[in-house]
Image (cartoon, rainbow, N blue to C red):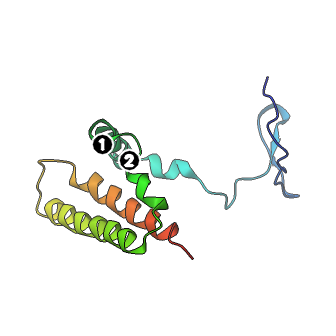
Amino acid sequence: MFEATGDFPTQATDERAHLANGMVRSPSGTKDNWLLITKGPMMRRWMKLLMRGAVNYGANNWTLALSAPDLAERAAVKERYRESFIRHAMQWLAGDRDEDHAAACIFNLNGYEAMVECDPK
């Protein structure tokens, strides 16, 4: 069985969805549906790119800069993501298939946006 690890509230509404054999759940309605992004090749290709990066640079190496306190260093990391994104985008648009430029675009967009979300407020 599962052991409780904390006090978490159950977020439920008065609405109910009735499922197999009497099972009742809150309807999914507008809840995030992560399954929608698993169709197509890109999630797997991005994951494979991250795995190759883990071999070359260490697992989750890209996250190290997220907590960097120096604003100039943070700006340099963001600019590097932008440079890399546009280079890979242009190579992808040109039909260059020497590496997975589409997955590299996703990597760089994600890295840039992660830096922005972690910017000191």
- Image coordinates of residue 83 in percent, x first then y, are 23, 68
Which quadrant is the N terminus positioned in?
Answer: top right
Name the residue that disc number 2 marks: 61
Given residues 83 and 40, the one toward you in this image is: 83
Q: Quadrant of residue 76?
A: bottom left
Query: Residue placed at 41% from the left, 45% from the top?
Result: 60
Q: Position of residue 24 (x, y in %)?
A: 83, 42
Mark 1 belongs to which amino acid?
Tyr
Residue that badge 1 annotates: 57
Taking 104 as reference, is 118 above or below it? below
The answer to whether mark 1 and mark 2 are in CB contact below 8 A is: yes
Question: From what the image shows, is residue 32 above or below residue 56?
Answer: below
Secondary structure found at label 1:
helix
Quadrant where the C terminus lies? bottom right
| Residue drawn at (30%, 42%) of the image | 57
- Among all residues in the image, which is located at the extreme top? 1
The image shows residue 21, relative to residue 102, as above or below, that is above
Foreground pick, 31 / 108: 108
Q: Amino acid at mark 2?
A: Asn
Q: Residues within 10 Å of mark 2 (few under 14, many from 20)?
A: few
Q: Relative to 16, say whether 73 is above or below.
A: below
Q: Residues within 10 Å of mark 1 (few under 14, many from 20)?
A: few
